[in-house]
Amino acid sequence: MDRLETQGIYTVEPKGIIVIGLLRELDTRSKRTTFQNFRRAVHGIEIITFDELHARARFIVEKSE
């Protein structure tokens, strides 16, 4: 038996996150569209850019103050 299971902790379909690149690198409509299509096509993994992650973190910190 898994050590976490003995403590009543179970993971079913854990969320995967990939942080890659910057939005400003997507400098053409074609690049943005391709990235958005790729992001939507991948299931079970959230794909975000470093600046999107930074914006989320900033939002969380500002709202908790």
Image: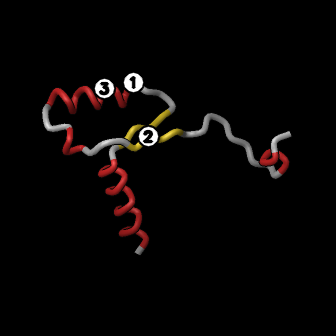
Above or below 30: residue 46: below
Between the C-alphas of marks 1 and 3, the distance is 6 Å
State how many labels appear. 3
Q: Nearer the viewer, residue 64 or 15?
A: 15
**Type of amino acid at the residue the image marks with label 3:** Asn
Q: Identify the residue position indicated by label 1 in the image.
A: 41
Apparent side of residue 56 relative to residue 43 in the rendered image (left or right)? left
- Quadrant where the image shows the N terminus: top right
- Name the image quarter holding residue 56: bottom left
Name the disc covering residue 18, or none: 2
Q: Secondary structure at mark 2?
A: strand
Q: Residue at x 41, y 63 (%)?
A: 60
- Which comes sooner in the sequence, label 2 or label 3? 2
Between the C-alphas of marks 2 and 3, the distance is 15 Å
Of the two numbered discs 2 and 1 in the rendering, the one whose residue sits closer to the viewer: 2
Q: Residue at x 14, y 31 (%)?
A: 29
Between the C-alphas of marks 2 and 1, the distance is 14 Å
Residue 50 percent coordinates (x, y): 33, 49
**Type of amino acid at the residue the image marks with label 1:** Ala
Q: Secondary structure at mark 3?
A: helix
